[in-house]
Amino acid sequence: MIVDRLNNPKTANSHFKNWLKRPWLKKDNGSAAIEFAFVAPIFITLLIGMFETGTMLIIQNSLDAAAREASRFGMTGGSTGNFSRKDSIYKKVQDVASAYSGGIVNPKLLKVAVVAYDSLDSMEKPEPYVDANENGLYDVGEYFEDLNNTGSWEEDQGESNSFGLKGEAVLYTVSYDYKSILSVFSFIGNVQLIGRSPVLNEGFP
Ligand SMILES: [Ca+2]
Ligand SMILES: [Ca+2]
């Protein structure tokens, strides 16, 4: 019965006209454009946010890989080709970060920090000192062990810019400043992403 009425061009046409007259459809006239104007910026911001989150995850993963691979190479004490040990390690960081990020990471903007310690347990620990005035802090004049040979007391006893001697522990840190697209709106500025890897050097000669 209904099918018959719809198949009849006359009645089908009047059905369509009635349908168009429905109040909820009328209400939409013109307001859709205004609604879109309100929702579009939020929607676009969300899209950019999702894109940025994905990009940062890819970069983070590449920094983790670069620190890991460079530290594993560095712990052997070796070098590649005509490169020095330092240049070999830096090259490793750049190559791995570029490859893992699919070229998103600009290798020239990568920062590499290496800090050497006597052991893995002493990583990022302060230089030992005698707390003569018992205030729980190091004060100038109190006796301390200058483990990193800087002539002063440090909260981190590691020796900076050192790939470590044989048997020493080394903390590799690879960092990258990611410039957010949303920084144009001052939502977020640069985001520093960091990959770290602690290793114990082998007994190389
Ligand atoms: Ca003190
Ligand atoms: Ca020191």
Image (cartoon, rainbow, N blue to C red):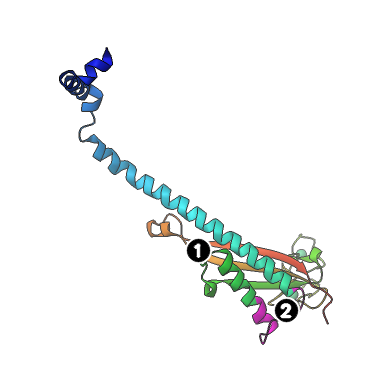
Quarter of the image that includes the C terminus: bottom right
Residue 199 makes an appearance in the image: yes
- In the displayed structure image, the side of residue 128 where residue 180 appears, left or right: left
User: In this picture, is 43 found above or below 183?
Assistant: above
Determine the image quadrant of residue 117.
bottom right
User: In this picture, is 92 found above or below 57?
Assistant: below
Q: Which residues are magenta?
A: 75-89
Residue 69 highlighted magenta (yes or no)? no
Determine the image quadrant of residue 151.
bottom right
- In the displayed structure image, the side of residue 178 where residue 90 appears, left or right: right
- Mark 2 vs ligand 2: CB below 8 Å: yes
Residue that numbered label 2 is attached to: 150
Looking at the image, which is closer to me, 15 or 189?
Answer: 15
User: In this picture, is 202 found above or below 54?
Assistant: below
Looking at the image, which is closer to me, 10 or 50?
Answer: 10
- Dot 2 falls on a residue whose secondary structure is loop
Residue that numbered label 1 is attached to: 178
Q: What residue is rendered at 59% in x and 63% in y?
A: 62
Q: What residue is rendered at 55% in x and 56% in y?
A: 57
